Amino acid sequence: MLRISRLADYALIIAHHLQQQANLISLEAIAENTKIPLATVRKLLRCLVQHQIVKSVRGARGGYLLAKPGDCISVADIIEAIEGPIALTECAKVTQSCQCELSPHCHLKEPWQQINQQLHMTLKTVKLTDINASISSTQQAPLDAPQPITTIEPSPIKIN
């Protein structure tokens, strides 16, 4: 099963919560409102601030807010801030050469890199505002009403 880490998921929850705030919000309030443990929120906010997704303001009236509009922050940005570059396999890592012992005999490196690139491009196109809009539309619709389904059509993968 492919899945993002719990920390990346929590970071998306925190970013979603910050998107809904008009003013600075304290670390404690974020933890309380999201039900994520305070130590985890602190750790994730540190990463998000370091990657310029969240802005930190010190002082008695300080707190946190998004560093840029939600339509400028992608799901990929948040995941990469927490987990580093997105790579489905060792061979899909763009930042370094493949460290797999099968690399000299494997013919799947290029297909995995192309699949990884498609996934990365898809995650880059999904913005924080898209997630917020999707959540808002589902929360406002009656339970028996058909729910809208948003699909993202992947580009065909060409494998030589």
Image: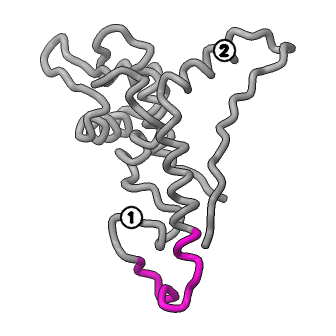
How packed mark 1 is, by other alpha carbons closer than 10 Å (few <14, some 14-19, many 20 or more), is some
Which mark is drawn over residue 29?
Answer: none
Q: Which residue is mark 2?
A: 137
Q: Which residues are magenta?
A: 98-111
Of circles 2 and 1, which is in front? Answer: 1
Which mark is drawn over residue 94?
Answer: 1
Residue 101, position as x, y percentages in the image = 47, 88
Q: Quadrant of residue 81?
A: top left
Q: Quadrant of residue 137?
A: top right
Residue 20, position as x, y percentages in the image = 44, 14
Q: Left or right: 19 with respect to 96? A: right
Is 108 in the magenta? yes
Q: Residue at x 43, y 29 (%)?
A: 14
> Which residue occupies the extreme bottom position in the image?
105
Element under disc 1: loop
Nearest the eye: 137 or 150: 150
Q: Amino acid at mark 1?
A: Val
Q: Residue at x 18, y 21 (%)?
A: 57
